Image: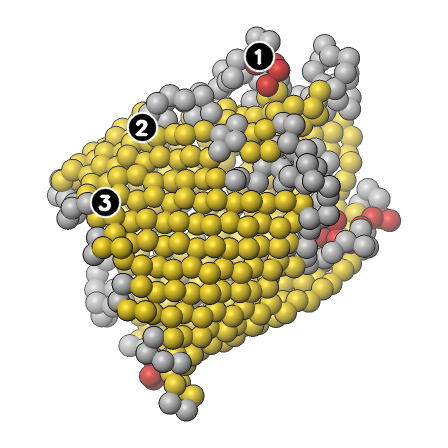
Amino acid sequence: YRALAMVDLLGNRHLFTDKHPENAYIAAEYVYSDAYFESPQNFKRFNVFGKYAGMLSEKTAVSFSASTFQSNWDASGQIPQRAVDNGMISRFGSIDDTEGGTTGRTNANFEVTNYLKQDAQIRNQVFYSNYHFDLYSNFTFFLNNPIQGDQIRQTEDGRNIFGYNGSYESNYDLGSKKVASVLGIGTRLDAGGLSLMNSLDRVVTDTVVSGDLKEQNLFAFTDQTLHLTEHLSLNAGLRFDYFRFKFADKTDPSQSGKANKSRLSPKLSLFYTVNQAVQVYARSGIGFHSNDSRGVVTNKTANVLPKAYGYEVGSTFKLTPKILINAALWHLDLENELVYIGDEGVVEISGPTRRLGTDLAIRYQISPLFFADADLNFNYGRLRNEAEGEDFIPLAPTFTSIGGVSLKQEKGFNASLRYRYIDSRPANEINTVRAEGYFLLDAVASYLWSKVHLGVSVENVLDRDWNEAQFDTETRLRNETEAVSELHFTPGTPFFMKASLSYLF
């Protein structure tokens, strides 16, 4: 069940200019669902969102938005394939149906844009977010505790996020060449408490980890685009990041500590426009992963900000006036692969990886009202320091694709039929367990009168059995004497239809 209300406070009045209308609105939504699991999900969510945008003067635009949501639910959790195969539970059953939790977030964002001469502009943004969650999970069932089970409780007790982004955009001449320039600075600070506890039926039995964390990122960047000729452009950028990590462990002070690290991340790109129908490009850059604060301060040998090296060449071209194609070849090296281990509440470093891939995107306008599109993505990835046959990257997709056909009109009847595909892929480093792929179809149809909007959507039109989250996990069930490592999953949505009726005012 879903209820949505929206009030446009100013009616989108164009008080200043057509380019910058003043508008303000508030939207609220309440959702309740038991979902398709055998154990009721009791999912409840309440959202409120408000926004105002307008002009303080002819040269100054402002916008402010605020939102909050609260949610709680019960969960059936991941289930082992063997429990389904032997008839112990169905695909929509559960081993521990006391999983679930609560979460919420409150956000505020304020932005001011000053328009200067010669199309230059200064943007200043400040934002704040308060986030909390309280989550009960059971990933391994009775593996570690054969009597009470392995349920854990993870909490973040009010993480506060403060941030600022500022930028200056301008255009200038470098000799006879034109340059588009962006300069920026910013910061983000995360601070809050976290804990990991053992529990039984949502009753805490002992505390494993409890502490306070702080992580701050300070950064500055420049992005310069030089138009060398009418057809050739060069884009160069450089970003500096400085991170400070701190964790104060209340359960074991020896695990407390501090760490800091800085990174310079350059990028370089070339764009060549052959004609109005064809553009080719080459891009390269160095970036990084951020990291887990607790893992950084407790593991003194950890790579605090593991680098990422990326390269890409491609082309965007019109095969015909109605067919647009983008094709690219890419390469990505990561110094470390970081994997979050949920039942232990830690980040595991699995070493450097390499990925090679190609992407293909096609857009086809069949007629003035009918459109077709498809995206195809191929990827070959391996762990770099492991022996052949033991170097698969768990759960890394090798082929994915999305696409469909659509009928689009401003009013009247609109419809689309969309597909999603992902192939089966290794779930562990030696490829003995595989995550199952799937092909899904979704359909949407709607009719819009002047103020009335009627919509119908269908998920999983073919009613396929498919797995959403999938992992190779070692678990033990209550009646088992030995642990088993195999595929564990949460079932995806079965055939589901919903209708909506909206009145616009």
Query: Residue 400: where, in percent of width, then height?
Result: 45, 39
In the rendered image, the quadrant that contains the C terminus is top left
Callout in the foreground (2, 3)? 3
In the rendered image, the vertical position of residue 232 relative to residue 205, given as above or below = below
Circle 2 SS class: strand
Along the viewing direction, whichever of 133 and 437 lies nearer the viewer: 437
Pointer 1 or 3: first along the chain: 1
In the rendered image, the quadrant that contains the N terminus is top left
Circle 3 SS class: strand
Which residue extends farthest right? 254
Q: Amino acid at mark 1?
A: Asp
Determine the image quadrant of residue 61.
bottom left
Query: Which residue is identified by label 1?
Result: 85
Mark 3 closeness class: few <14, some 14–19, many ≥20 residues within 10 Å: some
Q: Amino acid at mark 3?
A: Phe
- Between marks 2 and 3, how big is the CA–CA gap? 20 Å
Query: Which residue is identified by label 3?
Result: 371
Along the viewing direction, whichever of 307 and 239 lies nearer the viewer: 307
